[in-house]
Image (cartoon, helix red, strand yellow):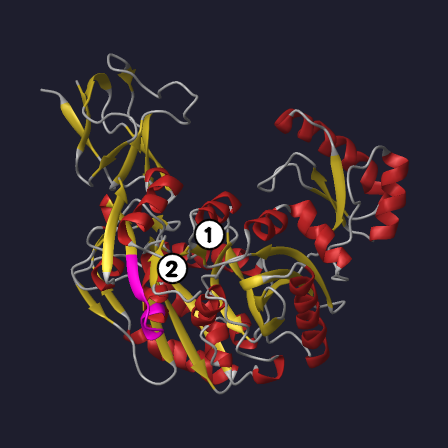
Amino acid sequence: MTISRLLIANRGEIAVRIQRAARELGIKTIQVYSAADADSLAVRMADDAINIGPFQAAKSYLNIEAILAAARATGADAIHPGYGFLSENPVFADAVEAAGLIFVGPKGETIRTMGDKAAARGAAQRAGVPVVPGSEGRVAELVEARRLAEKIGFPVMIKASAGGGGRGIRIAETAEALGSSLDQAAAEARAAFGDGGLYLERFIGKARHIEVQILGDGVNAIHCYERDCSLQRRRQKVWEEAPGSALSPDVREALCASAVALARSVNYRGAGTLEYLYDEESRSFYFIEMNTRIQVEHPVTEMITGIDLVREMICIAGDEPLRYRQTDVRVSGHAIEVRINAEDGSRDFRPSPGKVAALQVPGGMGTRFDTLLYEGYTVSPFYDSLLGKLIVWDTSREMALRRLDRALGELKIDGVITTVPLLQRLAEAPEIRAGAFHTRWLEQWLMTSMKSQVMEQSNR
Amino acid sequence: MPKELLAPLPGVFYRKPAPDKPAYKSEGDIVAVGDVVGLIEVMKSFIEVHAEAGGKIVRFVVGDEEPIMAGQSLLEIE
């Protein structure tokens, strides 16, 4: 069944991005919006737009009934969920199909399996994909923990079974330290979660966050190579690159092949991303989780492969088989994306919504700006702070860095404080230029660079 | 003449630290400078709102979980 009217169940820059792909395929676009987004660029650009509720996401963009009612009222035949909101909600995917509509994404059961950490880990192991070595469940007592820790390898991370958000995590460097750390971790876990259950996992101190983009049609699957998303603050990605400059050709091949094996084993349909930790010292990669949707940073992959991932998602959802064979996917040059957020980098990333008085968008060869902004738009305080993504491509990483610097200099957003000055300083950091960083590097750099800024100011 | 406490940022005003917790302050409470009187949720971040003057809270102008504009009066202190 081909799609002729696509409803976009999202907002912001990704809604604009999806509309562009749909329009090029000759598909009419229907944009849902909350009362706070009536003036948004996505609403202005769409063929049709429909209000689905008040500003609260729970009553609009997360309201399954309201979205399905909007689809019926506007004659939509398919729904694209974008990222965030309902994109990885299996109940929504099932409800869309039960309503006789196409869900642009995998089947509900795939989302359910891959959304469950233990089930996803199991699926990866069955497909022969390496996972972070760990205890496979709770450890009962010290003797067992010692035996397991020796097998996993030190340092080990002790995690609370009932935990989350980094609480209840301890690191034991040696077998001697394990005993006291276990007791403390169990006590903490009991206090915090009412459950003292613990499990062990290998601690990787300096890991890269590497992820592989895949496309599947339910039978076949291919990869579109990897991205390095190691530059993060509070687990939010700030800067992404493709390809990953830390990987050797043989590691890249093994990594990408493992992603395809896992995608095939679950008969994956649509675009998806497998996230891995990569330990540069041992040149080992470990699967951590899968995202069953389009990702914010998908454009860097598009820039190095020339494949429009959102277009392919829509074609797959319209029941077309994959239009690329693995040998058709070739990497050219290097791409970098930086996230432009409405946050004040000099004031602990304090949000800064407001009205865009003037806007100057960067252009030129290999320069792309995916944004929700237009001149005169008032940035809403009710949703996340992402204003846009500046993506550059060039023939090498070094040239891409120069182009990024040039493009950041051209970008002017008056009326809103943004992370542009911070990104400009980041682009000049020697570690960034050398490509030598890991997942905790950015937070350390921010701490040091904040301190030196404060010193500079107090010396004046 | 009561003093108005104005919202430093736009967003959603909360009178409680969490849905199942009691309100930070109620009408009639005495507050000191710097006391937390509410939260503003802005772009998924939560910013504490502090009293800028000491005194008695005469009334809350904005209710719990209501959307607010920057510079809007949140409450009055006497």
> Is A3 one of the magenta-colored residues?
no
Crowd tier of the residue under label 2, counting other residues whose Cα lies within 10 Å: few below 14, some 14–19, many 20 or above? few
Residue situated furthest left in the rendering: B1
In the image, is residue A376 above or below residue A283? above
Secondary structure under tag 2 reads helix
Is A202 on the left or on the right of A246, as rendered? Answer: right
Front-most of A95 and A459?
A95
Q: Residue tagged by mark 2?
A: A456
Say if labels 1 and 2 share a chain.
yes
Part of the protein shown in magenta: A22-30
Task: Determine the residue positioned at 35% across, 66% down.
Answer: A17
Is B17 on the left or on the right of A55, as rendered? Answer: right
Identify the mark nearer the N-term, 1 or 2.
Answer: 1
Task: Determine the residue positioned at 72% across, 73% down.
Answer: A254
Chain letter for mark 1, please: A
Task: Determine the residue positioned at 57% across, 41% down.
Answer: A165
Closest to the camera, between mark 1 and mark 2, is 1
